[in-house]
Amino acid sequence: MAPELKKTIKELAGFVLNKEGQKTGELSITFVSEEQIKELNQQYRNKDEVTDVLSFPIDQELLGEIVIAFQVAQRQAEEYNHSLERELGYLIVHGILHILGYGHKNSQDKKSMRSKEEKYLQKFGLGRE
C-alpha cells in the first residue's frame, strides 16, 4: 500500500474518532485476503461468505480492530466508480462507527449511520464526486 494512502487512512481514523469524542484509545486496522475475511466472517458472524469489512470492538483503551478485504475494496471502488481512497475511507468510517456502538439493524439506524458516514467523508475531503 502506498505511503500516502496509509497516511490518509491514519488521519481519517483520527478525524472520525476525534469528532465522535473519542480522545484516547488504540485502533487496529488490518488488511486481509478474501479467504481470510471469509474465515473470520464464518467464525465470528456464522456467515460463510466474503465481506468487505469486519469490526471488533474491544474496550475503552484498545478500542477495537477493523479488518478490511483489500481486493474487495478495490472491486467495489471500480463498481461504484470512485477512488480506492474513497472506498477505503468509507470502510474505515463504517468500521469505526460500529466499534463505537452504531449499527444498522433497522432502517432508522441504517439511515442515521449512513448520514454520519457521508458527513465525515465529506468533511474529510472524500465525499461523493
Image: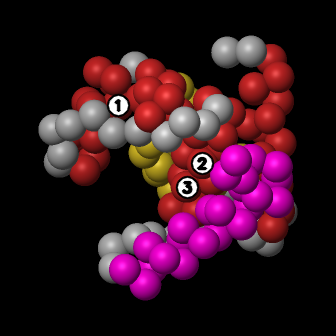
Determine which residue is flagged by label 3. Answer: 94
Q: Work out whether residue 76 or residue 27 is closer to the camera in this orientation and state it.
A: 76
- Judged by depth in the image, the label closer to the viewer, 3 or 2, is 2
State the residue at coordinates (82%, 49%).
125
- Labels 3 and 2 touching (C-beta < 8 A): yes
Single out the residue that lies furthest toward the top.
Answer: 2
Q: Is residue 123 visible?
A: yes
Which label belongs to residue 90? Answer: 2
Residue 90 x/y as whole percent = 60, 48
Q: Secondary structure at mark 2?
A: helix
Label the magenta part by its dominant secondary structure.
helix
- Judged by depth in the image, the label closer to the viewer, 3 or 1, is 3
Q: Secondary structure at mark 1?
A: helix
**Magenta span:** 107-129
Cα–Cα gap, marks 3 and 1: 16 Å
Determine which residue is flagged by label 1. Answer: 37
State the residue at coordinates (73%, 37%).
9
State the residue at coordinates (82%, 22%).
4
Q: Residues within 10 Å of mark 2 (few under 14, many from 20)?
A: many
User: Relative to 101, does residue 9 appear above or below in the rendering?
Assistant: above
Q: Secondary structure at mark 3?
A: helix
120 on left or right of 103: right
